Image (spheres, rainbow, N blue to C red):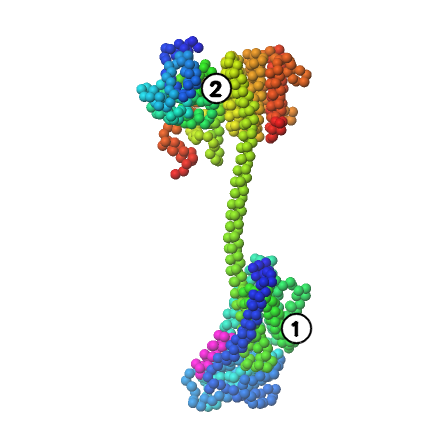
Amino acid sequence: MSVLSDQGASQPISILLVEDDAPTLWRLQDALATAGFHVTSAATLAEARASLAQAGPKVLLTDLQLPDGHGNELIRETRLRFPDTEIMVISILGDEESVISAITVGATGYLLKDAFPTDIAATVRELVAGHSPISASIARFIVRRTQSTAEAPPGPPLNTARLTPREIDILWGIAKGFSYAEIAGHLGLSRQTVPGHIKNIYRKLEVHTRGEAVFEALQQGLIRL
Amino acid sequence: MTDAAPTTAPSGRRRWPRRATLLIQYLLLQPLIIVLCLVVLRIPSPEPPSRYLVTDFSLRENGVERSVTLPHFITSRYTMRDPPLYSGRFDLSGGVPHGAWSVFLPRFTNGVEVAVNGVVILDSRRNPAANRPDRNTPEIAVIPASLLRNGANDIAIRLFVWGPIPGFLDRISVGPDAMLRPSYDARTLLFVTLPVVISAWQAILAVILGIMWAMRRHEPAYGVLAVAMAIGVGQAFFHTPLEDSALSRLNAILISAAPLESAFVLAFALLFFGWKWPRYGWLIFVPGLVVAAAGLAGDATLSRDAFLLVGAPTVGLYLIALAVVVGHSVWRRQDAISFMLGCALTIVLTCWALDVLSVVQIFPNRRILFARLSYSAMLVAIGAALTWRFARALNQVDGFAASMVVKVREAEDKLKASFVREEERARAAALARERTRLMRDLHDGLGGQLVSIVALSERGNASAGIGDAARAALKDLRLVIDSMDDIGGDLMLALGSWRERVTAQLRPHDIALVWRAVGPQGLPVHPELRPWHVIQIVRLLDEAVTNAVKHAGARRITVSIETTGDASGVARGRITIEDDGKGFVLAPDCEAGAAGQHAARGLRNMRSRAARCGAELDLTSDAGGTRVRLTLPRRFPDSDAAAG
């Protein structure tokens, strides 16, 4: 832990934390600051935009339900303006509804509001290191969407057409609770390549522009002109 | 047969007035038709100008010579030898004419040989059509100019008579061919060409009816009528030589054609109008067969007598029977077919009666026979009836198809509506069930934990306890939400999320979680797996982990997931949770011993949850640790029977 703190001190990682519930904000802020991150906090969308006016942070952590708007707007704007910023959603339950919609606008993971401080720090650090976290339930939601059904499944729209069979296999492994090492073993991969695959999965699920969304929906046969 | 015309079936007494009106109309129409027939038949047949008539003849018969005036009847005879000879003369006082002159014989029975000035110029026996007494065939012959001489010319006519009907010779004309031929042509058209056309029509009917019967074997009426038509055609087109020969025997069969044909038509009417076939119905064919037998077995005399005595009355009788059958049908079915056939029959019957009167010389009418000709009315009526019926059947098919389309659409709509209703009901029921379950699950977990938080917060000094309780509440909330998700019967998907939660739970306690899943599949898929099964199993596993954390003081928890075959070889999932804690003592009744009341309640809960899912729970504990082994059922139970 001390080593990590040193790393943080030598190269402070900037984090923009957007959360309207004060106790939760304090809790997360404490956990991240203790771990050595440089945390800027905002309670509303407006404050967050003001903070983003000058420069993009390394990491954006945002709640979705904000007093003056939805966190997804902030994620989309940040994604467009600062492509290098890692974005995570702060969620109470880690439910698919909120997390998946955030993923499609550019988020690459989520953080539970009640996670232990050490876990909070570790998750952010892994994110910066290029390891996008993914939970079993999110992986389950995505792979369920790859199984074509006649009628539109409930939940937010998600385009899984670009996922490769290998990526889908990895998602199945995660959904069933296997570790990266176990998945790599089952699929004959190197363990180190699994996080990269997951990052790719996130990128593929992201819908960049309105035009692209329409194009992909056409390709998938979701809409007809 | 009746089923083909269902709309005309009578239905109740209130239709009687209408039916009576129709019948009266029908009955009034028939005399009108008879009168009309009589009027039409009284129109004289075409004849050349009267100045060319030659009527005064001297007849030599059986060696006796007498003077006669045409038209003349002569008694029936059965020999061709020494025929009656009519000798007369015509005058060419103005000298031999420039144009051709002819002899015109408008009507004779049965054959003639005409000689002018001793030279035979015409023998009608070579003309088969002229040999038929039922055809009113005229003859004309041009007199070679070299035969004619100035002044008186002789004309001699031999009249060949073969019984049974008496011989007849109408007034003859001798004059310029140009003056005589128009009447001859008119008569030929009327009495020779028209019957041929009608016979052709009859042949077509025979073919159509035959095809109809071949395609619809269950309607023998058409077959019967086809036979009748075929007999009629055969009778019209087959001619046999007049001389006594083997072939002339066939003549007998032709003679028997008329009674046979009328018998078949009667049979058709009986079948067509839905009469029950009489038990001795086949007797109607007997007269025709008798005539045929007489013709084949006996000599010409017998055959002709048989025809006159048996055949002709039979035809009349059957015509009357037909009129009765059709009249009844007009009353009962009130359809156009009966009406048309009935009117046609009246025409035929009238002509037949007139012919009989003519033959027996009560109403001589110069022996123009109309029965055969009037039969065309019947044929036209049959053709029209067929077409009418065909068109109506097509309309019915169209109507049926249209109504079927409507009915099918209605049924479809109804089905769709009921399906939607049913689906909605099922959905509502499922929703209600889910709500009940959710309430119970939230009550079981979250409710208790929140109450615990309230209690702890009131004590004021147990903030750590509040944190644990709140964390447990959140964890349970996630479990409930997670279990609502459709996992397609793959329990592994639920265990994946559970592993994450347990990992997070164990990390602050510094307890290691070893996860051993055998194979990528792990557990068998249970399509019947429902969310409430998942909640029970996950809560059971939670309970085992919580016991290990709180009461056993374990440092390491191992979760093993595998699929084993049971005694009968069916794959069954097994989840084992082992810890390295201090264990507890199990009482003989499997209740927890000294390990504390809390753990005891936990164990009881675990047993109850396993029982509700039909799973087997196996608990072993000793100083080296505790092992909880859960063997999943082959099939998860449908209803939560043990829940109450």
Q: Is residue B335 magenta?
A: no
Q: Is residue A8 above or below residue A50?
A: above
Give residue B22's position: percent from left, percent from top. Answer: 56, 67
Foreground of the two, A89 or A129: A89
- How dense is the environment of label 2, judged by Cα within 10 Å: few (below 14), some, or many (20 and up)? some
Of B243 and A131, nearer the camera is A131
Q: Identify residue type, mark 1.
A: Ala
Q: Quadrant of the rendered structure where residue B628 is?
A: top right
Q: Tell me the number on the disc at residue A180.
A: 2
Range covered by the magenta-colored residues = B176-191
Quadrant placement of the N terminus of chain A: top left
Residue type for callout 2: Tyr
Residue at horizontal 62%, vertical 17%? Answer: B600
Residue B338 percent across, percent down from the top left? 56, 66
Marking on residue B249: none
For the question of whether residue B133 can be seen, the reply is no
- Main SS, magenta region, reads helix
Mark 1 near mark 2, Cβ–Cβ under 8 Å?
A: no
The chain that hosts pointer 2 is A
Q: Secondary structure at mark 1?
A: helix
Q: Quadrant of the C terminus of chain A?
A: top left
Kindly identify which residue carries mark 1: B294
Element at badge 2? helix
